[in-house]
Amino acid sequence: MDKPTIGSLDSRSALGTFYEELFAPTEEFFQSYDAGSRTIMGFAAPLKGRKPCAVELVVGTEVIAFSKAGRLSLQAYAAGLRFGWCGYELFGLSEAIAIDGDITVRCAVHGNVLHRYDRSAIEKAPQAGPVTLSARELLQELRLTNGTSDLKYILPFLKRYSSTHGTRDIVEALYRYIFRRSADESGLKTWTDRINEGTTPEHIAETLWSLAKYENSSVPPVLQGPFEPGFTFGLELFD
Amino acid sequence: MMMPNAYLEVSPMFEEYWTGIPNVAAAIAHNALRDSTIHWQFTFENALLPNEMVKQFLVQRSGVGGLASLADLVWTKPDISYADGQAGVGIFTGMKSVREFYAREAMIIYDLSPLLTPHFHTSDNINHFSDRIRDDIETTNHFFCISQAAANDVSAYFEIPSGKIDIIPMAFEYSPSDLSIAQGIARRHKVEPYIVVLGTLEPRKNGRLVLEYIARNPSFASQYRFVFVGREGWLSERSELMDKITAAGVDRNRIFFTGYVSETEKLGLLYNASFCIYGSFFEGYGLPVLEAALLGKIVVCSNSSSMPEVAPQSCLFFDPNDIVQLSRAISVASQRSMRTRQSLQSFEDVRAELEGRNWNACYTKIADWIHHG
């Protein structure tokens, strides 16, 4: 019953069982790295299914960083993979090169090596200096990690949801997703009437999203990705 | 030996945004799903829920859509029969929906705040709680309290013997991905010094005292930005206090109200903060204090109710009614935080710290009572 202890890859099989509950094994993988920020980015995806993948940056047996592959990846989007929602970022190459051992990215579920890095190439590349962030900018950066400010990456999910749900459900889902609250009575009536008169749910979504951005200009809102709590349109597209 | 039948009432998990009580219910449900020694079923009042629904809530960390599904369920699935109830054990994660329905019944008690601090509650809330609590307690065989303070209150006000009360340790559910994101920001950026003031904006959380501190110490706000993390409310009082702060010469932009934040955002904000303030007048536990402490943060913490139990080694305590004590604690925290080397901790060091405080110990107490109670 105890959660497996983490700390070394010797506990991989136990850890894998735990992670299998949350993540899918990686079957499609792409990586690149930014030498300046020493960040690895790319996408990791299963062939299908409603769970995201997860990847780890490992040196020897020590895990340096972990990422759920549920971010928006423009490369994955261009490749037609998971509507783009299988991106990851791994920070910590600077720490990695300070430790002895092979530098690898691995599938967090099965532990298999997905990519191996050339330590000397990383060490040679000049590192960019730190960027100063205000607390407000920090929050915005955190918000964007698992979301997007561009509605077009969410519309396929909305379209699928709209094909299987009634008008009221669609408006409620849009309110909970965009405004993080239930629809008030007047909003519910206004937008259900519009849909019933022929306006598409996508057009309603664009209107509501514009309103949300206008109301929250100090820290612009972000649309959460499909693997985040509060994503209201379901994951059937990944089946 | 026959496996015991147990029913976990999970109505708190139907809430859209999970904070304290839904998170506790979810953690118990998650462990219950993995326990092969007890035949667990999940209920909303008397309605049996499919396990898949509970799993979906756990994945999405929200009960969104649950009530709509429930409306369909009640027409298609029978309620638990009285005979089945009498053959099982009921565990209630909120107010009891039924009484003396199961062979044995246990409640989780978070606090008695509607009775002890009625001035922080609406009259509807007070009436609802007071109308129900005595009968709930009188029909319950065992109590799981989330703190010693809550246990003391239950014992004192309802004369419950100590043998019928267990304290269940609270924990911090986190995502290793969120931890990595927070560390990644610390590694790549130089973040301005800021202080996180924890808790939803409501009178009980005592944000007013912090704003009054800022008004009296305008130079401190030029050293640190104050970030109030949590859902916004209490808008007219906040507006009045912000005017007072501006009149004292503080730039309003030095104070930032985040509104609702996700778990990713909360962990990132906590991890990169200089230190935290939690000035609540009353808590049943004080989970935000535990979260901040496990991430290595110093917490300037109210000394009221349960809060001194949570993470005393990481806290500088003050009387939530005393601005002078708050000032002294903030001054010490500021000095200590400059010496903290937390940003150099490895991913695995921090993860081990967080893993050490998982929900197993809490669940084990409940499971033990089911087996042997």
Image (cartoon, rainbow, N blue to C red):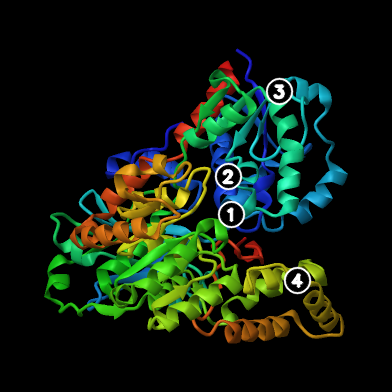
Tag 2 subunit = B
Q: x%, y% of residue B246? A: 44, 82
Considering the numbered disc 2 on the image, is that residue within a helix, a strand or a loop?
Answer: helix
Q: Do the residues labelled 1 and 2 touch (CB within 8 Å)?
A: yes
Judge by depth and name the residue closer to the eye, A42 or B182. B182
Tell me whether marks 2 and 4 sit on the same chain: no
- The amino acid on which the numbered mark 2 sits, given as a three-letter code, is Ala
Q: Residues within 10 Å of mark 1 (few under 14, many from 20)?
A: many
Q: Are marks 1 and 3 in contact (CB under 8 Å)?
A: no
Q: How far apart are marks 1 and 4 (CA)?
A: 22 Å
Q: x%, y% of residue B236? A: 60, 74
Between marks 2 and 4 in the image, the one whose residue lies nearer the viewer = 2
Q: Name the residue under label 1.
A: B18
Disc assigned to residue B88: 3
Q: How far apart are marks 2 and 3 (CA)?
A: 21 Å
Tell me whether marks 1 and 2 sit on the same chain: yes
- The image shows residue A24, relative to residue B212, as above or below, that is above
Q: x%, y% of residue B298? A: 31, 54
Going from the N terminus, do you reach mark 2 or mark 3 first?
A: 2
Between marks 1 and 4 in the image, the one whose residue lies nearer the viewer = 1
- The amino acid on which the numbered mark 1 sits, given as a three-letter code, is Trp
Q: Name the residue under label 4.
A: A170
Q: In which quarter of the image is residue A165?
A: bottom right
Q: Distance between the residues labelled 2 and 4?
A: 27 Å
Q: How far apart are marks 1 and 2 (CA)?
A: 9 Å
